[in-house]
Amino acid sequence: MDEFVRGLPKAELHLHIEGTLEPEMAFALAERNDVTLPYRSVEELRAAYDFTDLQSFLDVYYATAVVLQTEADFYDLTFAYLQRAAADGVRRAEIFFDPQTHTARGVPFEVVLTGITEAMADGRERLGVSSGLILCFLRHLPPEEAMATFEEALPYRDRLLGVGLDSSEVGNPPELFVDVYDRARAEGLHLVAHAGEEGPADYVRQALDLLGVERIDHGVRAEDDPPLVSRLAREGIPLTMCPLSNLRLRVFDRLEDHNLARLMEAGVKVTINSDDPAFFGGYVGTNYVETAAALGLTRADLTRLARNSLEATFLPADEKEALVAELDAYAGADAP
Ligand code: ADE
Ligand code: ZN
């Protein structure tokens, strides 16, 4: 199963670049930049990965991001991720970044963007992984700050694929961010948002109806609202699900309880992604393998999930079709 999964051409659509910071790299960058982490060793940092909910993770995630300071840091982080993604059969990655986490510390927006996008260009050329970049607004901060960040990003609009919304969900509903999503839509950017991870199904509705998003990041709680599930299926709205993240943040007690297979069965265009793989115990291939083992997914199910991921990308139709054809050739060759 492992080899089959890693050979499946797939897209990763829910991946926070800051969430790919491995403890070893965090300490190496801390030394390179002469900054002190609030942990004494790689082991102590790993020990802090015993999360109880989303916020307990975000506290560690923001604390480690302080080591990211220079263009080279963002380049190294991004290229390391793309190498791991390539090894997992990822042919297209639509990557999130959180500029506010960095600009608030005095790291210029351009430094963050240049480091990431140069690695993306090299990833395309040297690893054969095509990629796009999605700017996420931190929802625990005021909507005015999201708007200021958007304005700071506008001169670089051509380097962005879309915008998203992340960070602490409960109490920070999508409706607060209508204005900045309206601006992003007017700029022709793609729109996504985290919704229904810990927050209620109503946040998924708000993201669709008020923000006009094209994909929902997570969306597990949509299951509480059967008419909403029917709508997701009918309208072909993809969910970028992250099973190991949900397990580690205790959205589900056991991977066996995850609702991914039920939602797929209900006709929802479900995809598997890694979210913050350095923190949650596995990159995208491991998410496929462990989810398959826990939920009894077949090779046909995994092929469907990979196909969903390619179809849910924001690639032009011809590039999408080329990747789906590659998937068909691979899965067809595997058929008995
Ligand atoms: N930022 C990074 N990972 C996140 C997640 N799973 N939910 C919300 N914000 C995040
Ligand atoms: Zn996420």
Image: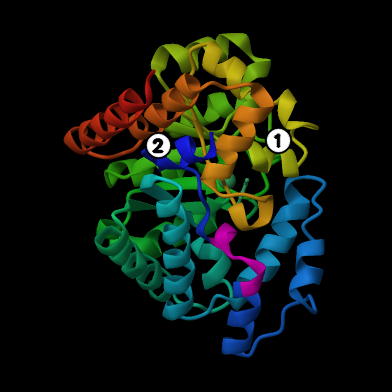
Indicate whether residue 295 is drawn in magenta: no
Q: Quadrant of the C terminus?
A: top left
| Residue 178 visible in rendering | no
> Observer-nearest residue: 73 or 69?
73
Give the residue displayed 39% in from the left and 65% down from the top. 152
Tag nearer the camera, 1 or 2: 2
Q: Which contiguous range is marked in magenta?
A: 18-24
Q: CA distance from mark 1 to mark 2?
A: 30 Å
Q: Which of the two labelled residues, at mark 1 and mark 2, occupies the earlier sequence position?
A: 2
- Height in image: 88 above or below 222? below
Question: Which residue lies under the disc numbered 2?
Answer: 8
Q: From the image, tell me which residue sits under label 1.
A: 198
In the image, is residue 68 above or below residue 321? below
Secondary structure mostly seen in magenta is helix
Most extreme residue toward the bottom is 34
Q: Position of residue 75 (x, y in %)?
A: 42, 72
Q: Are marks 1 and 2 in contact (CB under 8 Å)?
A: no
In this rendering, would 316 be left or right of 193? left
Neighbours of disc 2 within 10 Å: few (<14), some (14-19), many (20+) = many
Is 114 left or right of 326, judged from the image as shown? right
